[in-house]
Amino acid sequence: MITCIEKRNDGICLYEMKNDDLHVLVSSYGVTILSIEAKDRDGKFENVVLGHPAIDDYMKKDGYYFGAVVGRVCNRLAKGEFTLDGVEYHVPINNGPNSLHGGIDGFSYKNFDSKIEGDSLVFTYTSKDMEEGYPGNLKLTVTLELKGNSLEITYDAITDKKTLCNLTHHTYFNLNGQECDVKDHLMHINASRHGLVDKDGLCTGHFREVYGTPLDFTKEAPVSQGLNLNDEQTENAYGIDHHFVLDDEDDQFTLYDPKTGRLLTVNTTFPGMQIYSGNYIGKCEGINGKSYDQHWGVAVEPQYLPDSIHNQEQPDAILRPGEQLHETITYTFDIR
Ligand code: BGC
């Protein structure tokens, strides 16, 4: 069942999506997933995603992007510059020498129009031509639906001018009731290669095989394995903050908390995922009176290759008039 539980004077709407397996709170501001309550092995519901104490905290732009949709271009765009059909574009630089997560005022900070349509919650936003420096009026629809023990998110976008578009959700998972960090969570990523990053965290367009490195999660391993900085790549990123190229369409990502028995599976139509071990999270107040610190959650961000415009001969992140971007991300919660 989906209910609008609050409509604020500033137009922000809060929704609750509820069934026997999941209780989800979503805000129209940044299509932000505020909380997902899932059962542990004793049937106890607890929130498993990181969030701020109040909606207004999401507007402070602290750079955490807890639970928010990210666009028009997620992750880093080198030097905030790109060229399409011979025209040079410049977008805001907000992360070292690069542009991160759509610029200073990206989609995470926009209030979307919203409506309940049957079993779905539908959010829409039109990003105007040259908003944050990107060409083309881009119409974006983000649809959320509960299907049993899964939350499915669908992204649809069209444009009236050739543009860049790479979308994701920036949901951080902590399956242990947020009492401690996630270093002991066991992670599996069905990826034999990952993208290399430079010291600014920018994806260079080069790849390496994960085998024999701290980023080998082809077999389930504790998150802490990726926090071993005795490797140029984990050292550059202060832990895990890399794009993993998915090998298969099934069994793409799992995260398991041995303490509570909660098992998260993430599947997506995107070709890869940025996995980020919360390296830059500092001491802060979270939702439901919890306090967070470094590595308090793992952000699982399915997307096209970061900086795709500079790193691919035929960039996935280019959207042309007449084309429709259509991708999904599904979070499934089980007990093991
Ligand atoms: C990036 C990190 C960044 C984090 C929060 C992730 O997607 O890869 O480098 O710190 O988002 O902004």
Image: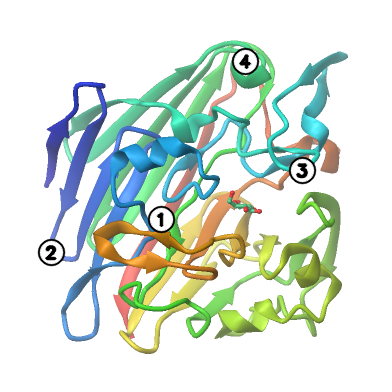
Q: Residues within 10 Å of mark 2 (few under 14, many from 20)?
A: few
Residue 321: mark: 4
Quadrant where the C terminus lies? bottom left
Which secondary structure lies at badge 4? loop
Say whether disc 4 or disc 3 marks the residue closer to the N-terminus.
3
| Amino acid type, callout 3 | Gly
Q: Residues within 10 Å of mark 4 (few under 14, many from 20)?
A: some
Pointer 1 residue: 330
Give the Cα separation between the discs numbered 3 and 1: 32 Å
- Residue 220 at x, y percent in the picture: 56, 84
Depicted 279 relative to depicted 180: above or below: above
Residue 96: mark: 3
Say whether disc 4 or disc 2 marks the residue closer to the N-terminus.
2
Give the Cα separation between the discs numbered 4 and 2: 42 Å
Say whether disc 3 or disc 1 marks the residue closer to the N-terminus.
3
Say whether disc 2 or disc 1 marks the residue closer to the N-terminus.
2
